[in-house]
């Protein structure tokens, strides 16, 4: 799999497989997670597969999203390119960098999402309007 959108990437976890004792996955700050982790959150109980979560971007916060169990579809949009990724393994996660619009959908009933974030929760860091998102991306491009 190749990431086509900007401000994203793949993070591989260290895996210790054990057929009898279960599989161990390890994520370490500044080793495979490319930032100091300030917050970890998880989503489960995704009973309604028609639900769409996310649908926002961040101004500053960097995150890495994992599927710890089951599967879901991750939709990414950097303002120019779009990409859909089926996450159905714990073994790798996807970087959600700043100014990357993301949505999660198509959840399996047993789906568990785990996210590592570079910042504490701050509603002011969210871009929740797609129109504003496109404006911010454009402004950022002009600054370069
Ligand atoms: P929301 O942004 O809708 O979640 P998602 O991006 O997964 O669809 O967040 C749901 C609610 O939880 C919203 O009121 C904000 C709050 N929240 C926190 O208080 N702390 C957090 O770390 C996160 C991610 C959300």
Image (spheres, grey):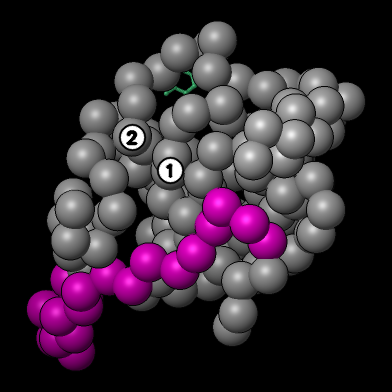
* CA neighbours of label 1 inside 10 A, class few (<14), some (14 to 19), many (20+): many
Q: Answer whether residue 110 is magenta in the image.
A: no
Most foreground residue, 144 or 55? 144
Tell me where the magenta segment starts and ends, as one range.
Answer: 5-24
- Residue placed at 56% from the left, 52% from the top? 7
Q: Answer whether residue 8 is magenta in the image.
A: yes
Residue 63, which numbered label? Answer: 1
Q: Looking at the picture, does residue 38 appear above or below residue 17?
A: above
Quadrant of the frame with the N terminus: bottom right
Residue 17, which numbered label? Answer: none
Cα separation, mark 2 vs mark 1, equals 6 Å
Q: Helix, strand, or loop for circle 1?
A: strand
Query: If you read the primary sequence from the N terminus, does the residue marked by circle 2 or circle 1 appear first?
Result: 1
Residue 118, which numbered label? Answer: 2
Q: Looking at the picture, does residue 109 appear above or below residue 99?
A: below
Location of residue 57 (image quadrant): top right
Q: Main secondary structure of the magenta part?
A: loop
- Residue placed at 38% from the left, 66% from the top? 11
Image coords of residue 134 (percent x, y): 83, 33
Quadrant of the frame with the C terminus: top right
- Residue placed at 52% from the left, 48% from the top? 96
């Amino acid at each position: 799999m190749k990431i086509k959108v900007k401000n994203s990437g793949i993070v591989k976890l260290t895996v210790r497989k054990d057929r009898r004792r279960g599989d161990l996955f390890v994520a370490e700050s500044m080793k495979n997670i490319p930032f100091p982790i300030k917050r970890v959150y998880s989503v489960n109980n995704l009973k309604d597969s028609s639900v769409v979560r996310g649908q926002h971007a961040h101004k500053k916060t960097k995150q890495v999203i994992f599927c710890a169990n089951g599967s879901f579809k991750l939709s990414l949009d950097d303002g120019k390119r779009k990409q859909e990724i089926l996450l159905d393994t714990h073994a790798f996660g996807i970087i959600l960098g700043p100014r990357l619009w993301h949505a999660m959908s198509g959840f399996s009933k047993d789906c568990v999402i785990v996210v590592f974030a570079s910042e504490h929760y701050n509603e002011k860091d969210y871009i929740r309007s797609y129109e504003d998102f496109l404006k911010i991306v454009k402004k950022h491009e002009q600054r370069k």
